[in-house]
Image (cartoon, rainbow, N blue to C red):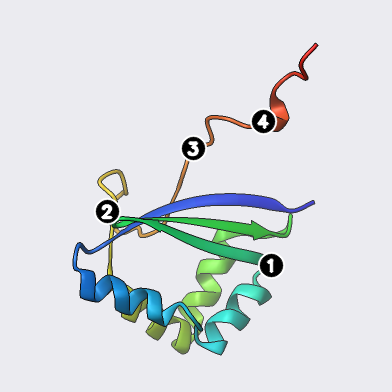
Amino acid sequence: MNTCYCMALDLKDDPALIAEYERLHERIWPEVSAHLRSAGVQDMQIYRLGTRLFMLMDVLSEFSFEAFEAAATANPKVREWEALMWRYQTPTPWTPEGSKWIPMQRIFSLGEQPAPD
């Protein structure tokens, strides 16, 4: 069974940088895509509202953030991509120091609501 993670991150409040960030995501580098898929990421979507980013990660049950980060650190192209992305990104006000994408807390699920009588 897959798991869905919802993550948040902010962008720097600069329209030119935001446009460039979006352009870069029209086609991410193949090495980054391969890294995501090899880690068990089945699908990833990023949405934007103003400077706030919301990412959905649909991952295989065996996905591990620790293994994901270790593989990213070992891959020079992924490190290069992440360094480039940090030019556009900034942590949310609630992000611990040294972190980027931060998991969001789910507060509602229609699937967990009782069916109407």
- Left or right: 95 as drawn, with respect to 33: left
Q: Position of residue 55 (x, y in %)?
A: 49, 57
Amino acid at circle 3: Gln
- Compared to residue 49, the image places residue 27 above or below, namely below
- In the image, what residue occupies the spot 80% across and 11% down? 117
- Compared to residue 57, the image places residue 77 above or below, namely below
Can you identify the residue that label 4 sits on? 110
Can you identify the residue that label 1 sits on? 40
Q: Secondary structure at mark 3?
A: loop
Task: Return the mark for residue 105.
Answer: 3
Can you identify the residue that label 2 sits on? 97
Amino acid at circle 2: Glu
Mark 4 or 3, closer to the camera: 4
Earlier-in-chain disc, 2 versus 4: 2
Q: CA distance from mark 2 to mark 3?
A: 19 Å
Mark 2 or 3, closer to the camera: 3
Q: CA distance from mark 4 to mark 3?
A: 15 Å
Residue 23: image quadrant is: bottom left
Q: Secondary structure at mark 4?
A: helix
Whether the residues at callouts 1 and 2 have beta carbons within 8 Å, the answer is no
